Image (cartoon, rainbow, N blue to C red):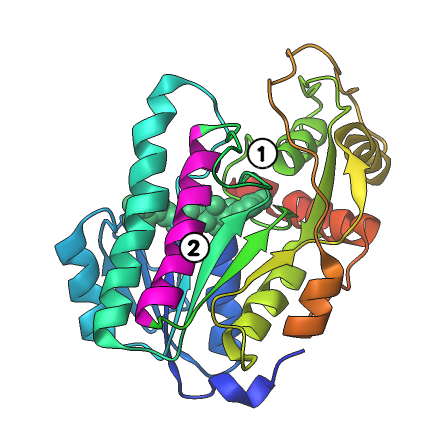
Amino acid sequence: MYDEGFFNQRTVLVTGASGFIGSHLCARLKDLGALVHGVSRRPRNNGVVQQWWQADLDDELATRRVVKSVSPEIIFHLASFVSGKRELDAVLPALRSNLLSTVNLLVSSTETGCARVVLTGSLEEPEGDAATATPSSPYAAAKGAASAYARMFHALYGTPVVTARLFMVYGPNQQDHNKLVPYVTLSLLRGQSPQLMSGTREVDWIYVDDVIDAYLCLATRPGLEGETIDVGSGRLTSVRSVVEQVVEIVRPARAEPDFGSIADRPLERVRTADVRKALLLAGWKSKTSLFEGLMRTVDWYRGNMGNL
Ligand SMILES: NC(=O)c1ccc[n+]([C@@H]2O[C@H](COP(=O)([O-])OP(=O)(O)OC[C@H]3O[C@@H](n4cnc5c(N)ncnc54)[C@H](OP(=O)(O)O)[C@@H]3O)[C@@H](O)[C@H]2O)c1
């Protein structure tokens, strides 16, 4: 685990601070006494950051301006176009908000200097031989390329960068209600049948509070520069099983999930986090069981239905 006192009065920059994971991270950092600067394209303060920066990180000059002005000790880069859609219209947004934003941030932080840059990778990145692996989506291609840049920046310029490769994150206040857990939860709470694929895909699920613990370990643990650390539970659970657990928690549900009403997507990946490496190098492992995490998540949506 991490030293809780480490962040007190330290200046940190969180990109994608308005997003699902970014807002949880900002809240935790604030609780730990950090001076939190948040950035995203919207003129929105997530309520807990010290200062809000409105910038599109696709833009080199805007990125440089934010990083120079804040001069953070630690950068957490979460800004991203987060969609696994395979359609052609996803290619350029994925390129800009996942790859270009990361390269801009790596250039700026290397020029300005900082103690650690924590990037955010994904289970969707291609595995195996980088020269021949075929990405499954524009998002996967851009995330894989961003990780390659991270390794290059570390090797060539000594940038103190570490990548948190996140598996499937769920938890309270996930703003994209099309993602599986919020979609199924909200549908059932509203008495509507969620329309779903077959549900056979197996996924490594990880609760958002555990992910925040991982970010804090990756930011503080010495000797992690250049590494990629998997942030997952190490266990596979099918989509169908997750949906059935949500049904059990919501009970009495007034509607049933409609499996198979949507066609399965091509090239779905099945991948389990390397939890041994995460524990050995980063001193981190997940604590929250899937059922416990889903209970907390459903509770939150139940309590906040009126505001969504
Ligand atoms: N959720 C998961 O299960 C999961 C799994 C694996 C990896 N990840 C990774 O975890 C990170 C956070 O994901 P999330 O679920 O929290 O996503 P999210 O809720 O969609 O948040 C994405 C954030 O990025 C900002 N953003 C997007 N493009 C930007 C740009 N060009 N410049 C500045 N800000 C930009 C968005 O704000 P604006 O729209 O205001 O700009 C938003 O704050 C991402 O890197 C994602 O790829 C997530």
Q: Is residue 78 left or right of residue 285?
A: left
Q: Position of residue 83 (x, y in %)?
A: 47, 33
Residue beneath disc 2: 78
Q: Which of the two residues, 68 or 261, is positioned nearer the viewer here?
A: 68
Identity of the residue furthest to the left in this view: 61
Nearer-N-terminus badge (2/1)? 2
Residue beneath disc 1: 179
Residue behind label 1 places its C-beta within 8 angstroms of ligand 1: yes
Q: Secondary structure at mark 2?
A: loop
Residue 91 visible in the snapshot: yes
Please name the residue shown 77% across and 59% down the image.
Answer: 288
Q: Position of residue 157 (x, y in %)?
A: 30, 69
Q: Is residue 61 left or right of residue 144?
A: left
Please name the residue shown 51% across and 33% down the image.
Answer: 132
Q: Amino acid at mark 2?
A: Leu
Q: Which of the two residues, 31 or 235, is positioned nearer the viewer here?
A: 235
Q: Position of residue 88 (x, y in %)?
A: 37, 18
Q: Position of residue 20 (x, y in %)?
A: 50, 50
Q: Which residues are magenta?
A: 138-157
Q: Secondary structure at mark 1?
A: loop
Residue behind label 2 places its C-beta within 8 angstroms of ligand 1: yes
Q: Amino acid at mark 1?
A: Lys
Q: Nearer the viewer, mark 2 or mark 1?
A: 2
Q: Which of the two residues, 140 or 54, is positioned nearer the viewer here?
A: 140
